[in-house]
Image: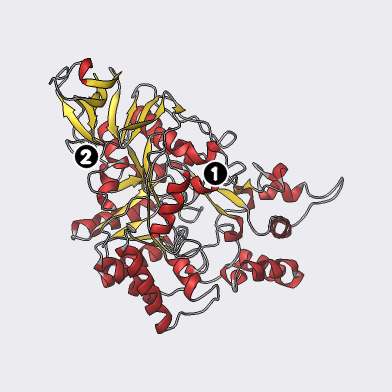
Amino acid sequence: MRGTSFPLLLRGGSVADGTGAPLVARDVAVVGGRVRLLAPGEVGSEDADEVVDVSGLVVAPGFIDAHTHSDTSCIDGAEGRLDEAQVFASVLQGVTTEIAGNCGHSAFPGKYPGLAALSDAHSAVGRANHLASLVGHGTLRSAIVGQQARAASATEVARMADALDEALAAGAVGFSTGLIYTPGSYADTAEITALARVAAQHGKPYVTHLRDEMSGVQDALEEAVAIARDSGAALHVSHHKTAGKYAWGLTEVTLARLAELRESGMDVTCDVYPYTAGSTALSAMLPPWAHDGGKERLLERLRDPGQRELIRKAIAEGVPGWENTVGNGGWDRIVVAGAPRHPAHQGRTVAELAREAGGAGDPGMDAVDLVAELLLGEDGEVTIISHSMREDDVRRVLAAPFAMIGSDGVPTAGLPHPRWAGTFARVLGCYAREAGLFDVPEAVRKMTGATAARFGLADRGVLRDGAHADVVVFDPARVADRATFASPLAGPEGVRLVAVGGTVVVRDGELTGARPGQVVGVGRR
Protein backbone atom coordinates (compact mmCIF):
# COMPACT_ATOMS: atom_id res chain seq x y z
CA MET A 1 0.00 0.00 0.00
CA ARG A 2 2.71 2.38 -0.99
CA GLY A 3 1.88 6.05 -0.92
CA THR A 4 -0.17 5.67 2.29
CA SER A 5 1.49 6.93 5.46
CA PHE A 6 0.23 5.82 8.85
CA PRO A 7 1.45 7.63 11.98
CA LEU A 8 1.08 4.37 13.96
CA LEU A 9 0.92 0.72 12.94
CA LEU A 10 0.28 -2.08 15.45
CA ARG A 11 1.47 -5.25 13.76
CA GLY A 12 0.90 -8.91 14.59
CA GLY A 13 -1.77 -8.72 17.28
CA SER A 14 -5.19 -10.27 17.83
CA VAL A 15 -8.09 -7.82 17.74
CA ALA A 16 -10.92 -7.85 20.28
CA ASP A 17 -13.17 -5.40 18.48
CA GLY A 18 -15.49 -4.46 21.36
CA THR A 19 -18.54 -6.34 20.09
CA GLY A 20 -17.78 -9.65 21.80
CA ALA A 21 -16.82 -11.29 18.50
CA PRO A 22 -13.96 -13.83 18.63
CA LEU A 23 -10.38 -12.62 18.45
CA VAL A 24 -9.11 -12.18 14.92
CA ALA A 25 -5.62 -11.57 13.56
CA ARG A 26 -5.41 -8.03 12.22
CA ASP A 27 -2.91 -5.24 11.95
CA VAL A 28 -4.28 -1.96 13.27
CA ALA A 29 -3.24 1.31 11.68
CA VAL A 30 -4.03 4.89 12.61
CA VAL A 31 -4.56 7.71 10.16
CA GLY A 32 -6.17 11.07 10.88
CA GLY A 33 -7.00 9.98 14.40
CA ARG A 34 -9.10 7.09 13.08
CA VAL A 35 -8.63 3.32 12.87
CA ARG A 36 -7.83 1.23 9.80
CA LEU A 37 -8.03 -2.55 10.15
CA LEU A 38 -5.64 -4.39 7.83
CA ALA A 39 -4.89 -7.96 6.96
CA PRO A 40 -1.70 -9.21 8.65
CA GLY A 41 1.28 -7.92 6.69
CA GLU A 42 -0.87 -5.88 4.30
CA VAL A 43 1.41 -2.87 4.69
CA GLY A 44 5.13 -2.67 5.26
CA SER A 45 7.17 -0.83 7.82
CA GLU A 46 7.98 1.83 5.27
CA ASP A 47 4.29 2.83 5.22
CA ALA A 48 4.20 3.88 8.90
CA ASP A 49 5.97 6.49 11.00
CA GLU A 50 5.97 4.17 14.02
CA VAL A 51 5.58 0.40 13.91
CA VAL A 52 4.92 -1.54 17.13
CA ASP A 53 5.23 -5.32 17.17
CA VAL A 54 2.25 -6.58 19.20
CA SER A 55 2.64 -10.28 18.44
CA GLY A 56 0.98 -12.40 21.12
CA LEU A 57 -0.93 -9.40 22.44
CA VAL A 58 -4.55 -8.28 22.24
CA VAL A 59 -5.45 -4.99 20.57
CA ALA A 60 -8.75 -3.60 21.85
CA PRO A 61 -10.72 -0.38 21.85
CA GLY A 62 -9.65 1.89 24.67
CA PHE A 63 -11.60 1.02 27.80
CA ILE A 64 -14.53 3.26 28.75
CA ASP A 65 -15.06 3.62 32.48
CA ALA A 66 -18.84 3.70 32.96
CA HIS A 67 -18.70 5.28 36.40
CA THR A 68 -16.11 7.69 37.79
CA HIS A 69 -15.86 10.67 40.10
CA SER A 70 -12.94 12.15 38.18
CA ASP A 71 -14.81 15.25 36.98
CA THR A 72 -11.99 17.67 37.85
CA SER A 73 -9.05 15.38 38.63
CA CYS A 74 -6.76 16.73 35.89
CA ILE A 75 -7.55 20.29 36.97
CA ASP A 76 -6.94 19.37 40.60
CA GLY A 77 -3.63 17.80 39.63
CA ALA A 78 -2.51 20.86 37.73
CA GLU A 79 -3.43 23.06 40.69
CA GLY A 80 -1.56 20.88 43.20
CA ARG A 81 -4.48 19.19 44.98
CA LEU A 82 -3.71 15.74 43.54
CA ASP A 83 -0.47 14.13 42.49
CA GLU A 84 0.27 12.42 39.19
CA ALA A 85 -0.44 8.91 40.51
CA GLN A 86 -3.96 9.93 41.53
CA VAL A 87 -4.71 11.76 38.30
CA PHE A 88 -3.43 9.22 35.79
CA ALA A 89 -4.17 5.85 37.45
CA SER A 90 -7.09 5.35 35.11
CA VAL A 91 -5.31 5.80 31.78
CA LEU A 92 -2.41 3.60 32.91
CA GLN A 93 -4.77 0.62 32.91
CA GLY A 94 -6.09 1.44 29.45
CA VAL A 95 -9.07 3.71 30.10
CA THR A 96 -9.36 6.19 27.23
CA THR A 97 -12.74 7.68 28.23
CA GLU A 98 -14.08 8.34 31.73
CA ILE A 99 -17.81 8.88 32.38
CA ALA A 100 -18.07 11.38 35.25
CA GLY A 101 -20.98 13.22 36.89
CA ASN A 102 -22.25 10.11 38.65
CA CYS A 103 -24.25 9.59 41.84
CA GLY A 104 -26.01 12.92 41.45
CA HIS A 105 -22.87 15.05 41.61
CA SER A 106 -21.39 16.78 38.56
CA ALA A 107 -18.99 19.68 38.08
CA PHE A 108 -21.76 21.75 36.49
CA PRO A 109 -23.92 23.71 36.93
CA GLY A 110 -22.00 25.24 39.83
CA LYS A 111 -18.35 26.11 39.81
CA TYR A 112 -18.52 25.53 36.06
CA PRO A 113 -21.71 26.90 34.48
CA GLY A 114 -21.81 24.18 31.86
CA LEU A 115 -20.00 21.46 29.95
CA ALA A 116 -18.27 23.99 27.68
CA ALA A 117 -16.72 25.78 30.66
CA LEU A 118 -15.57 22.47 32.14
CA SER A 119 -14.10 21.54 28.76
CA ASP A 120 -12.22 24.84 28.58
CA ALA A 121 -10.77 24.26 32.06
CA HIS A 122 -9.56 20.77 31.10
CA SER A 123 -8.13 22.04 27.82
CA ALA A 124 -6.13 24.65 29.69
CA VAL A 125 -4.27 21.99 31.72
CA GLY A 126 -4.36 19.04 29.29
CA ARG A 127 -5.80 15.54 29.61
CA ALA A 128 -4.24 12.19 28.75
CA ASN A 129 -7.65 10.64 28.04
CA HIS A 130 -11.20 11.76 27.29
CA LEU A 131 -13.95 12.76 29.72
CA ALA A 132 -17.72 12.65 29.25
CA SER A 133 -20.16 13.75 31.93
CA LEU A 134 -23.66 13.18 33.21
CA VAL A 135 -25.64 15.96 34.90
CA GLY A 136 -26.07 15.37 38.63
CA HIS A 137 -29.46 15.78 40.29
CA GLY A 138 -27.83 16.68 43.63
CA THR A 139 -25.88 19.43 41.90
CA LEU A 140 -29.02 20.79 40.26
CA ARG A 141 -30.94 20.65 43.53
CA SER A 142 -28.16 22.29 45.50
CA ALA A 143 -28.00 25.16 43.00
CA ILE A 144 -31.76 25.76 42.86
CA VAL A 145 -33.30 24.40 46.07
CA GLY A 146 -30.30 24.43 48.39
CA GLN A 147 -29.35 21.88 51.06
CA GLN A 148 -32.65 21.95 52.93
CA ALA A 149 -34.49 18.74 53.79
CA ARG A 150 -37.75 19.59 52.05
CA ALA A 151 -39.72 18.96 48.92
CA ALA A 152 -38.93 21.10 45.91
CA SER A 153 -41.71 23.39 44.75
CA ALA A 154 -43.22 23.06 41.28
CA THR A 155 -41.35 26.20 40.25
CA GLU A 156 -38.05 24.79 41.53
CA VAL A 157 -38.61 21.50 39.70
CA ALA A 158 -39.29 23.46 36.53
CA ARG A 159 -36.07 25.43 36.99
CA MET A 160 -34.09 22.22 37.53
CA ALA A 161 -35.69 20.78 34.39
CA ASP A 162 -34.67 23.84 32.37
CA ALA A 163 -31.08 23.63 33.63
CA LEU A 164 -30.98 19.91 32.87
CA ASP A 165 -32.38 20.47 29.39
CA GLU A 166 -29.69 23.05 28.68
CA ALA A 167 -26.90 20.77 29.91
CA LEU A 168 -28.11 17.76 27.93
CA ALA A 169 -28.46 19.89 24.80
CA ALA A 170 -24.86 21.01 25.31
CA GLY A 171 -23.59 17.42 25.24
CA ALA A 172 -23.95 15.87 28.70
CA VAL A 173 -24.51 12.14 28.26
CA GLY A 174 -27.33 11.56 30.76
CA PHE A 175 -28.96 12.44 34.08
CA SER A 176 -27.71 10.92 37.34
CA THR A 177 -29.03 10.61 40.87
CA GLY A 178 -27.44 9.57 44.14
CA LEU A 179 -30.46 8.94 46.32
CA ILE A 180 -28.54 7.98 49.45
CA TYR A 181 -26.72 11.34 49.41
CA THR A 182 -28.06 14.70 50.45
CA PRO A 183 -29.58 16.79 48.99
CA GLY A 184 -30.69 14.13 46.49
CA SER A 185 -32.14 11.96 49.26
CA TYR A 186 -34.58 14.74 50.11
CA ALA A 187 -36.30 14.36 46.71
CA ASP A 188 -39.35 12.20 46.21
CA THR A 189 -40.02 9.90 43.28
CA ALA A 190 -42.19 12.45 41.49
CA GLU A 191 -39.38 15.02 41.41
CA ILE A 192 -36.91 12.54 39.93
CA THR A 193 -39.47 11.35 37.39
CA ALA A 194 -40.10 14.89 36.17
CA LEU A 195 -36.39 15.36 35.57
CA ALA A 196 -35.84 11.94 34.04
CA ARG A 197 -38.53 12.90 31.54
CA VAL A 198 -36.17 15.62 30.27
CA ALA A 199 -33.44 13.01 29.76
CA ALA A 200 -35.91 10.87 27.83
CA GLN A 201 -36.69 13.79 25.53
CA HIS A 202 -32.98 13.91 24.64
CA GLY A 203 -32.75 10.14 24.22
CA LYS A 204 -30.31 9.93 27.13
CA PRO A 205 -30.38 7.58 30.12
CA TYR A 206 -31.44 7.96 33.72
CA VAL A 207 -28.41 6.75 35.71
CA THR A 208 -29.01 6.05 39.38
CA HIS A 209 -27.26 5.18 42.59
CA LEU A 210 -30.31 3.54 44.13
CA ARG A 211 -31.92 4.92 47.27
CA ASP A 212 -30.88 1.74 49.07
CA GLU A 213 -28.35 -0.92 48.05
CA MET A 214 -28.70 -2.84 51.31
CA SER A 215 -31.74 -4.34 53.04
CA GLY A 216 -34.13 -2.16 51.01
CA VAL A 217 -32.51 -2.81 47.63
CA GLN A 218 -35.56 -4.48 46.06
CA ASP A 219 -37.87 -1.57 46.83
CA ALA A 220 -35.19 0.89 45.69
CA LEU A 221 -34.84 -0.94 42.40
CA GLU A 222 -38.60 -0.83 41.89
CA GLU A 223 -38.55 2.93 42.48
CA ALA A 224 -35.93 3.28 39.73
CA VAL A 225 -37.98 1.09 37.41
CA ALA A 226 -41.08 3.20 38.05
CA ILE A 227 -39.14 6.39 37.32
CA ALA A 228 -37.88 4.97 34.03
CA ARG A 229 -41.31 3.67 32.99
CA ASP A 230 -43.16 6.85 33.89
CA SER A 231 -40.57 9.14 32.31
CA GLY A 232 -39.75 7.08 29.24
CA ALA A 233 -36.01 7.21 29.97
CA ALA A 234 -33.66 4.27 29.61
CA LEU A 235 -32.50 3.04 33.03
CA HIS A 236 -28.91 2.43 34.07
CA VAL A 237 -28.25 1.20 37.63
CA SER A 238 -24.92 2.38 38.97
CA HIS A 239 -22.43 -0.01 40.65
CA HIS A 240 -25.13 -2.62 41.20
CA LYS A 241 -24.68 -4.50 44.44
CA THR A 242 -26.57 -6.03 47.35
CA ALA A 243 -24.49 -4.90 50.30
CA GLY A 244 -24.69 -5.49 54.02
CA LYS A 245 -25.47 -8.73 55.83
CA TYR A 246 -29.24 -8.39 55.35
CA ALA A 247 -28.91 -8.20 51.55
CA TRP A 248 -26.22 -10.77 50.82
CA GLY A 249 -27.39 -13.12 48.10
CA LEU A 250 -30.14 -10.83 46.83
CA THR A 251 -28.37 -10.32 43.49
CA GLU A 252 -30.12 -13.53 42.47
CA VAL A 253 -33.39 -11.64 42.83
CA THR A 254 -32.34 -8.24 41.48
CA LEU A 255 -30.56 -9.62 38.43
CA ALA A 256 -33.52 -11.84 37.62
CA ARG A 257 -35.74 -8.76 37.83
CA LEU A 258 -33.48 -6.79 35.49
CA ALA A 259 -33.39 -9.71 33.04
CA GLU A 260 -37.20 -9.93 33.15
CA LEU A 261 -37.50 -6.22 32.42
CA ARG A 262 -35.14 -6.50 29.48
CA GLU A 263 -37.09 -9.45 28.08
CA SER A 264 -40.25 -7.35 28.29
CA GLY A 265 -38.57 -4.68 26.15
CA MET A 266 -37.35 -2.23 28.77
CA ASP A 267 -33.98 -0.58 28.10
CA VAL A 268 -32.16 -1.27 31.37
CA THR A 269 -28.49 -1.95 32.11
CA CYS A 270 -26.10 -1.68 35.03
CA ASP A 271 -22.43 -1.31 35.83
CA VAL A 272 -20.30 -3.01 38.47
CA TYR A 273 -16.81 -2.82 39.96
CA PRO A 274 -14.90 -6.05 40.73
CA TYR A 275 -14.44 -5.68 44.49
CA THR A 276 -16.31 -6.61 47.66
CA ALA A 277 -15.70 -3.18 49.20
CA GLY A 278 -17.21 0.17 48.33
CA SER A 279 -16.07 3.69 49.12
CA THR A 280 -17.81 6.93 49.97
CA ALA A 281 -17.75 9.85 52.40
CA LEU A 282 -17.68 9.20 56.13
CA SER A 283 -20.45 11.75 56.54
CA ALA A 284 -22.73 9.47 54.47
CA MET A 285 -22.74 7.11 57.47
CA LEU A 286 -24.88 9.68 59.33
CA PRO A 287 -28.68 10.01 58.99
CA PRO A 288 -30.06 12.37 56.32
CA TRP A 289 -31.58 14.80 58.82
CA ALA A 290 -28.11 15.49 60.22
CA HIS A 291 -27.18 17.10 56.88
CA ASP A 292 -30.22 19.40 56.70
CA GLY A 293 -28.89 22.86 55.80
CA GLY A 294 -25.54 21.68 54.45
CA LYS A 295 -22.09 20.95 55.77
CA GLU A 296 -21.88 23.82 58.27
CA ARG A 297 -25.13 22.75 59.91
CA LEU A 298 -23.83 19.16 60.04
CA LEU A 299 -20.68 20.31 61.81
CA GLU A 300 -22.76 22.34 64.27
CA ARG A 301 -24.78 19.24 65.10
CA LEU A 302 -21.62 17.19 65.59
CA ARG A 303 -20.41 19.72 68.19
CA ASP A 304 -23.64 19.32 70.16
CA PRO A 305 -23.65 16.33 72.60
CA GLY A 306 -27.42 16.09 72.40
CA GLN A 307 -27.37 15.88 68.62
CA ARG A 308 -24.62 13.26 68.76
CA GLU A 309 -26.89 11.18 70.95
CA LEU A 310 -29.69 11.46 68.42
CA ILE A 311 -27.28 10.39 65.65
CA ARG A 312 -26.18 7.43 67.76
CA LYS A 313 -29.81 6.41 68.26
CA ALA A 314 -30.60 6.79 64.55
CA ILE A 315 -27.73 4.46 63.60
CA ALA A 316 -28.72 1.91 66.23
CA GLU A 317 -32.46 1.93 65.46
CA GLY A 318 -32.58 3.07 61.84
CA VAL A 319 -34.56 5.80 60.08
CA PRO A 320 -37.37 4.96 57.64
CA GLY A 321 -36.13 5.24 54.06
CA TRP A 322 -32.45 5.52 55.05
CA GLU A 323 -29.88 2.96 53.92
CA ASN A 324 -27.91 3.03 57.24
CA THR A 325 -24.65 1.43 56.18
CA VAL A 326 -23.34 1.02 59.72
CA GLY A 327 -26.59 -0.51 60.94
CA ASN A 328 -26.32 -3.05 58.13
CA GLY A 329 -22.72 -3.95 58.91
CA GLY A 330 -20.94 -2.24 61.79
CA TRP A 331 -18.10 0.20 62.38
CA ASP A 332 -15.62 -2.67 62.15
CA ARG A 333 -16.29 -2.75 58.38
CA ILE A 334 -15.67 0.97 57.89
CA VAL A 335 -12.03 1.88 57.15
CA VAL A 336 -10.76 5.46 57.08
CA ALA A 337 -9.31 6.05 53.61
CA GLY A 338 -8.65 9.78 53.32
CA ALA A 339 -8.11 12.05 56.32
CA PRO A 340 -5.19 14.36 55.45
CA ARG A 341 -4.91 15.92 58.93
CA HIS A 342 -5.06 12.50 60.60
CA PRO A 343 -2.78 10.30 58.46
CA ALA A 344 -2.37 7.75 61.26
CA HIS A 345 -6.10 7.04 61.02
CA GLN A 346 -5.88 6.02 57.35
CA GLY A 347 -6.13 2.30 56.71
CA ARG A 348 -7.71 1.56 60.10
CA THR A 349 -11.31 0.77 61.00
CA VAL A 350 -13.47 3.17 62.95
CA ALA A 351 -14.10 0.44 65.54
CA GLU A 352 -10.37 -0.09 66.02
CA LEU A 353 -9.65 3.63 66.31
CA ALA A 354 -12.46 4.06 68.83
CA ARG A 355 -11.19 1.18 70.99
CA GLU A 356 -7.67 2.61 71.05
CA ALA A 357 -8.70 6.22 71.69
CA GLY A 358 -8.34 5.95 75.45
CA GLY A 359 -5.22 5.35 77.52
CA ALA A 360 -4.22 2.33 79.56
CA GLY A 361 -7.26 0.84 81.26
CA ASP A 362 -9.58 3.15 79.36
CA PRO A 363 -12.36 1.37 77.46
CA GLY A 364 -11.90 3.80 74.59
CA MET A 365 -14.32 6.14 72.86
CA ASP A 366 -17.76 5.55 71.44
CA ALA A 367 -17.52 5.13 67.68
CA VAL A 368 -19.97 7.95 66.92
CA ASP A 369 -17.92 10.31 69.07
CA LEU A 370 -14.76 9.24 67.25
CA VAL A 371 -16.46 9.87 63.91
CA ALA A 372 -17.76 13.26 65.05
CA GLU A 373 -14.34 14.41 66.22
CA LEU A 374 -12.67 13.16 63.04
CA LEU A 375 -15.19 14.96 60.82
CA LEU A 376 -14.81 18.16 62.85
CA GLY A 377 -11.03 17.90 62.57
CA GLU A 378 -11.22 17.44 58.80
CA ASP A 379 -13.86 20.09 58.12
CA GLY A 380 -16.30 17.32 57.23
CA GLU A 381 -14.16 15.87 54.41
CA VAL A 382 -13.21 12.25 55.16
CA THR A 383 -13.45 9.30 52.78
CA ILE A 384 -13.96 5.72 53.87
CA ILE A 385 -13.93 2.18 52.48
CA SER A 386 -16.86 -0.05 53.41
CA HIS A 387 -16.27 -3.81 53.33
CA SER A 388 -19.90 -4.65 52.80
CA MET A 389 -20.29 -7.16 49.96
CA ARG A 390 -19.86 -10.85 49.28
CA GLU A 391 -17.80 -12.34 46.47
CA ASP A 392 -20.58 -14.50 45.02
CA ASP A 393 -22.77 -11.41 44.59
CA VAL A 394 -19.96 -9.51 42.86
CA ARG A 395 -19.31 -12.40 40.46
CA ARG A 396 -22.99 -12.78 39.71
CA VAL A 397 -23.31 -9.14 38.65
CA LEU A 398 -20.05 -9.20 36.69
CA ALA A 399 -21.26 -12.19 34.68
CA ALA A 400 -24.64 -10.66 33.80
CA PRO A 401 -24.67 -9.97 30.04
CA PHE A 402 -26.22 -6.50 30.57
CA ALA A 403 -23.56 -5.44 33.10
CA MET A 404 -20.68 -3.23 32.03
CA ILE A 405 -17.62 -2.17 33.99
CA GLY A 406 -17.29 1.04 35.98
CA SER A 407 -14.61 1.67 38.57
CA ASP A 408 -16.54 4.14 40.76
CA GLY A 409 -13.04 5.56 41.12
CA VAL A 410 -12.51 8.62 43.27
CA PRO A 411 -9.09 10.23 42.73
CA THR A 412 -8.20 11.45 46.21
CA ALA A 413 -5.34 11.72 48.67
CA GLY A 414 -4.66 9.15 51.38
CA LEU A 415 -5.39 5.47 50.83
CA PRO A 416 -8.21 5.52 48.27
CA HIS A 417 -9.98 2.42 47.05
CA PRO A 418 -7.70 0.43 44.68
CA ARG A 419 -10.50 0.27 42.08
CA TRP A 420 -9.35 3.58 40.55
CA ALA A 421 -6.04 1.96 39.56
CA GLY A 422 -7.03 -1.69 39.26
CA THR A 423 -10.57 -2.27 38.00
CA PHE A 424 -10.00 -3.00 34.30
CA ALA A 425 -6.84 -5.05 34.71
CA ARG A 426 -8.58 -6.99 37.50
CA VAL A 427 -11.53 -7.86 35.28
CA LEU A 428 -9.17 -9.19 32.60
CA GLY A 429 -6.76 -10.96 34.94
CA CYS A 430 -8.76 -12.18 37.92
CA TYR A 431 -12.21 -12.68 36.46
CA ALA A 432 -11.62 -13.50 32.77
CA ARG A 433 -8.32 -15.39 32.77
CA GLU A 434 -8.28 -16.92 36.26
CA ALA A 435 -11.94 -17.33 37.26
CA GLY A 436 -13.22 -17.91 33.72
CA LEU A 437 -16.41 -15.88 34.23
CA PHE A 438 -16.19 -14.85 30.57
CA ASP A 439 -13.66 -14.90 27.77
CA VAL A 440 -11.45 -12.00 26.71
CA PRO A 441 -13.72 -10.75 23.88
CA GLU A 442 -16.70 -10.60 26.27
CA ALA A 443 -14.62 -8.89 28.97
CA VAL A 444 -13.55 -6.31 26.40
CA ARG A 445 -17.15 -5.78 25.25
CA LYS A 446 -18.21 -5.06 28.84
CA MET A 447 -15.45 -2.44 29.05
CA THR A 448 -15.88 -0.85 25.62
CA GLY A 449 -18.69 -1.42 23.15
CA ALA A 450 -21.43 -1.93 25.71
CA THR A 451 -20.51 1.26 27.54
CA ALA A 452 -20.20 3.33 24.39
CA ALA A 453 -23.66 2.18 23.31
CA ARG A 454 -25.19 2.95 26.71
CA PHE A 455 -23.93 6.54 26.69
CA GLY A 456 -24.25 7.25 22.97
CA LEU A 457 -20.51 7.58 22.30
CA ALA A 458 -20.50 7.16 18.54
CA ASP A 459 -17.45 5.49 16.95
CA ARG A 460 -15.93 4.76 20.36
CA GLY A 461 -15.71 1.44 22.12
CA VAL A 462 -15.18 -0.47 18.86
CA LEU A 463 -12.30 -1.23 16.54
CA ARG A 464 -13.56 -0.89 12.98
CA ASP A 465 -12.60 1.21 10.01
CA GLY A 466 -13.27 4.86 10.77
CA ALA A 467 -13.65 4.52 14.55
CA HIS A 468 -11.82 6.91 16.85
CA ALA A 469 -8.29 5.64 17.38
CA ASP A 470 -8.62 5.09 21.13
CA VAL A 471 -6.74 1.82 21.58
CA VAL A 472 -5.26 -0.36 24.30
CA VAL A 473 -2.79 -3.20 23.84
CA PHE A 474 -2.47 -5.79 26.60
CA ASP A 475 -0.89 -9.16 27.25
CA PRO A 476 -3.74 -11.58 27.99
CA ALA A 477 -1.38 -13.98 29.77
CA ARG A 478 0.02 -11.35 32.14
CA VAL A 479 -2.49 -8.55 32.55
CA ALA A 480 -3.34 -8.15 36.23
CA ASP A 481 -4.09 -5.51 38.82
CA ARG A 482 -1.42 -4.70 41.40
CA ALA A 483 -3.35 -2.06 43.34
CA THR A 484 -4.20 -3.12 46.89
CA PHE A 485 -5.82 -1.46 49.88
CA ALA A 486 -2.32 -0.91 51.30
CA SER A 487 -0.89 0.29 47.97
CA PRO A 488 -3.96 1.56 46.14
CA LEU A 489 -2.31 3.39 43.26
CA ALA A 490 0.07 0.67 42.06
CA GLY A 491 -0.18 0.40 38.30
CA PRO A 492 -1.24 -2.80 36.51
CA GLU A 493 0.87 -5.43 34.84
CA GLY A 494 0.54 -6.35 31.20
CA VAL A 495 -0.83 -3.11 29.72
CA ARG A 496 1.66 -2.46 26.95
CA LEU A 497 0.33 0.56 25.08
CA VAL A 498 -2.53 3.06 25.26
CA ALA A 499 -3.35 5.46 22.43
CA VAL A 500 -5.89 8.29 22.58
CA GLY A 501 -6.96 9.68 19.22
CA GLY A 502 -4.03 7.81 17.73
CA THR A 503 -1.46 9.46 20.02
CA VAL A 504 0.43 7.12 22.33
CA VAL A 505 -0.10 8.25 25.93
CA VAL A 506 1.15 5.12 27.73
CA ARG A 507 4.00 2.91 26.58
CA ASP A 508 5.12 -0.11 28.65
CA GLY A 509 3.43 1.19 31.78
CA GLU A 510 4.84 4.69 31.58
CA LEU A 511 3.14 7.94 30.66
CA THR A 512 4.57 9.55 27.55
CA GLY A 513 3.52 13.06 28.56
CA ALA A 514 1.16 13.44 25.60
CA ARG A 515 -2.16 15.12 26.41
CA PRO A 516 -4.55 14.56 23.47
CA GLY A 517 -7.64 13.96 25.60
CA GLN A 518 -10.78 16.07 25.32
CA VAL A 519 -14.10 16.59 27.07
CA VAL A 520 -16.52 14.89 24.68
CA GLY A 521 -20.25 15.42 24.38
CA VAL A 522 -23.19 13.69 22.76
CA GLY A 523 -25.93 15.31 20.72
CA ARG A 524 -24.79 18.91 21.10
CA ARG A 525 -27.21 21.38 19.55
Residue at the disc numbered 2: 467
Q: Where does the image place residue 56, in percent across and percent down from the top left? A: 29, 18
What's the residue type where badge 1 is placed?
A: Gly
Is residue 474 in view?
A: yes
138 to 421, vertically: above or below: below
Is 391 on the left-hand or right-hand side of 4?
A: right
Q: Residue at x 36, y 49 (%)?
A: 271
| Quarter containing the C terminus | bottom left
312 to 31, vertically: above or below: below
Question: Mark 1: which secondary structure?
Answer: helix
Name of the residue lying farthest toward the left? 1
Within 10 angstroms of label 2, few (less than 14), some, or many (20 or more) residues? Answer: some
Q: Residue at x 25, y 65 (%)?
A: 202
Residue at the disc numbered 1: 77
Is 93 on the left-hand or right-hand side of 460?
A: right
What's the residue type where badge 2 is placed?
A: Ala
Name of the residue lying farthest toward the bottom? 154
Is residue 226 in view?
A: no
Question: Mark 2: which secondary structure?
Answer: loop
Between 405 and 501, the one lying in front of the other is: 501
Real-space Cα separation, disc 1 to disc 2, in angstroms: 30 Å
Within 10 angstroms of label 1, few (less than 14), some, or many (20 or more) residues? Answer: some
Q: Where does the image place residue 240, in percent across and percent down from the top left? A: 39, 52
